Image: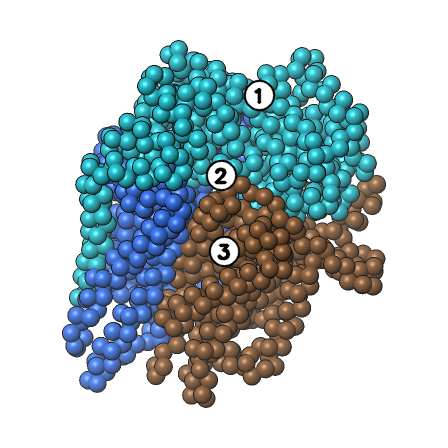
Chain colours: A brown, B cyan, C blue
Amino acid sequence: MSQFFTQAILTATVASGIALATPFLLASLGETIGQRSGVINLGLDGIMLLSAFTSYYVALNTGNLGLAVLSGVGVGFLMGIATAFISVTLKAEQGISGIGVYLFGLGLSDLLFVKLVGTPLPIASLPAFRIPVLADIPILGPMLFQQTLLVYFAFLLVPVVTFILDRTTYGMKIKAAGENPAAADSLGVSVARIRWSAVLIGCSMAGLAGTSLLLYDGIFQQNLTQSEGFIAVALVYFGAWTAVGVMGGSLLYGLVAAVVLAWKALGIIPLSASDLAATAPAVLTVLALLWVGRRFRQPAVLGKPYERGE
Amino acid sequence: MQRTTSRGTSLLAASAALLIVAACGSGATAAPVASTAPAVSSAPAASTAPASAAASAAPASAAASAPAASAAASAATGAGTGQVLKVALVCPSAKNDLAFSESMVDALNSMQQQYHLQIAISDNQFVVADAGNVIRQYASEGYNLVIAHGSQYGSTIQQLAPQFPKVSFAWGTAGTTYNLPNVFAYQAASNEGGYVQGAMAAMLSKSKVLGVIGPIAVGDAKLYVDGFVAGAKSVDKSITVNPVYTGSFSDASLFAAAAKTFVSGGADVLTGTAQAVVGAIGVARSDNLPWFGTQWTQASLAPKNEVSAQVYDWTPILKQMFTAIRGGTLGGATYTIGLGNGGEVIQYNSGYNLPASVKAKGDSLIKAITEGTLNVPQ
Amino acid sequence: MRSGVDWRLLLFSWIALPAALVGALLVGAVMMAAFGADPINGYRALVQGAFGSSYALGATAVKAAPLLLVAVGICIAFRANVFNIGGEGQIAMGGLASAATALAFPNLPSVILIPLVLLAGAAGGAAWGAIPGAFKAYFNVNEILSTIMLNLVAVQLMNFLLAGPMVDKSAFSTGGLIPETRLLSPNSWLPILVPGTQLHLGVLVAVIVAFAVYFLLWRTSFGFRIRAVGLSIPAATYAGMPVKRTVTLAMTLSGAMCGLAGALLVFGSLSHRLVTDGSLTGFTGSAGFNGIVVALFGGLNPIYAIVSAFLFGGLVVGGNSLQVATGVPSDLVTTLIGLAVVFIVSLEYLRHRARSRALALAHVAPAGAGTPGTPPATLVDGGSA
């Protein structure tokens, strides 16, 4: 039995790690685009919470998961308008305004939950979608190809974001806005408009990340994200502002978390070390970055508002 | 230098503005309280206004807190007889958490009429230091009994209780009153229900793998989990049951991931404790697996999957506390709820079609524990 | 130094901060009304609960002290252009280190034990701040990443230590062990300054530390180095300053402030134990984040942070009274604090514009070095020198 037990559980661990990584991936891909244009958004977690609650509320009242996803992205977009207005148009100090947005989302999402919903009820969770043929491959199939549509979508975004950033003029403009806005400006690129669009994309994706987390759990709770938004910001640094790097970070974090859970279930990790083992994803992420840290440089004007004529 | 001063003054101005608001607020307290009070109460519960306490300024918050406690109606009726017992509850999670907090909230509300209670509830007090302030506030506002419903509040009670010798305090789950005359302690033998449910789970399982998920390995959670494991092993020594402690009481995603890990590893029956179990229950529901709850019934989350839940019914011990307090004894006793004294109830969920043999096993274990012929190891 | 009249700036500073707060409170009033609660009643309860009695004032001051210390730590880091969002973890490590010290030396007299536990708290936080500081300076690991991750590590370390090595083994009950230390030696308790309130020595310590850090930043060469590094690393390097060491030390000091806050939370608490509910917030009350807000409202100046900490401490303490009075969860206060932050950083724009106009005027005359880069220049003022 134990043979079957371990092999099945190892397959499942990878599948579970990928599912756990998905909200991180969605949020940090969006944050990558924003940061490439020069805008840090520390309010990610607050946006994820507001989107998760909205999706929950919509799903609870309509039973329509598609509508729930759309409304989550919509709230992300709305928060994106606010974020872009504050950090780009009003040139606010981004680190601190992000903390403001975080506290706002943290408080408001629970306030609305208590007042509008009260007693928590479950919503339908997103069904797994088996990709024909691929899903039937032994071992690999159950690991990779029996996930929900949101998971596939998140991972499809990796090449899309890479392509946009590296191969399109829009991507060039984003990077120019983050590296040398004055030069971009002199070439006729509207730095403000580029940053606005990048922030809107980033926040919409944060909204989707919140929704995907909600659909994974199937229910809303106070502080549902448990700081996942902050971890997503951290993973952008880990991923060195590339989509592939961010994917690596998300997978590392999600897989390590899943492995720890699996080893606990298998009794490999003793009870006494249970709490210490839970630190593994965070510790390994920092250590991994320590290893690769020196090779990368952040966007030159990250976090700094652009002033014409400086 | 100039800007320095301007910034300083602006802050002072800010604080001045707040203080003005404060002055307005308290200045207005004397007269318009009567006029605002109905406005408050008109929304949730129309009957608080007659409570004469609303006239006195300081305890206004106490009086106004009654609407928060859902049904405040009878508080007013009891006021005339002088028999009203003012009870305040401070709990760490939401009052409808389908778990620990809700069990006490429901017990109090169900006893309100019969025991002439005026109830105030502060939920979501997970910041221990803030909870201490709230507990103290209730004590100083003349509440007869302040229930600190969380083991993390104990040391606060230990320090506060001697300062309020006329107020009775209760805290749990815990086993000590710190030898203070005005402190009750209460605890739950959650291992008993855990044992019964573990045995039933082992009988229901075909794969002989069970999934058990807890927060951190202490207190009530560990007790329940240990009982569950012992119960399962009593049916089948070879059963695979390695509990996972996720390291968090509130991370629903981790609980869901742990449940999925178990399911993929072959587990076909799940249980768990902490408010984050909602994540794991979602897995039981979507994979259509049996679920065992504890602390409170979670059948509303999994109407077809919850087999049974060990429900905490605090009414028997609350009754003893009320009687003691009315008789002038403010503390000194430790109460334990268990299957034997009706404080723990295994509540079967009618939505789950439980095989008769399994139910018979459960019932016989309950009977054995109740009669004392079976001693559940801790 | 500056030509032209600063009256615009003056007017702005007079109006902006109160306006942001009042604006947020107005939004809060609308929310309360929308939830069927009476805003006037709610705010009256808030003010009463925070400032309405000597006990309330004491509770507010006690809540404010850790906020102030975190804010002071944020000021130090921010001046060095490092953003410390690891306050939560640093507070927890400070609490653990100080509690461990009190457990190890329960019999020392108060005059020795109290300073010792406070120092131990500062040391614990300092260690947890030094790691991201050194990682940033020497390994180019961004501090936002490392502090977020270290928060996650700290909470599990706390769970581990309080459930195992540091747990109170005497408090056994049917419910098993409670994840807390045993009652710490009374010799380590922070003495109450005003009888009948909670106002303890730690509040005084926090205020003194705020003044000391102000002095450190603006009256010592070390402080000058921190600010120079914060303004421009190339310039500081050119001037021969040890940039890496300065960044590391700034984060270490920032962490020490948070760690000291953690010690106050243990030894100035009602419970005089270190208790965990499995989360960081349960111990810190989110002081690591709220302290950032306090620092902002204090213009990133340790002395103004004193007033700002008292105000926000009041908001948090009063939030519970608001919940009791209206049934609106104290989440409302969290929401409003977030809004106020957003308002104030947004309003900074107006001031910024007014100032750049003033600067433009100044540039007509042969001005000085101009503005070197733009670190947090919009917010970094208030310091004189």
The residue identified by callout 1 is: B343
Can residue A124 be seen here? The reply is yes
Crowding around mark 2 (Cα neighbors within 10 Å: few <14, some 14 to 19, many 20+) is many
Label 3 environment density (alpha carbons within 10 Å; few <14, some 14–19, many ≥20): many
Q: Which residue is mark 3?
A: A50
Name the residue: 75% across, 25% down: B359
Residue B208: x %, y % from top left? 79, 35
Q: Amino acid at mark 2?
A: Ala
Q: Position of residue B287 (x, y in %)?
A: 73, 45
Identity, as a three-letter code, of the amino acid under mark 3: Leu
Residue ID for mark 2: B94
The answer to whether residue C69 of the structure is visible from this angle is: no
Q: Are marks 3 and 1 on the same chain?
A: no
Left or right for C355, reference A22? left
Q: Earlier in the sequence, mark 1 or mark 2?
A: 2
Q: Amino acid at mark 1?
A: Gly
Q: Name the residue at 31% across, 37% down.
A: B38
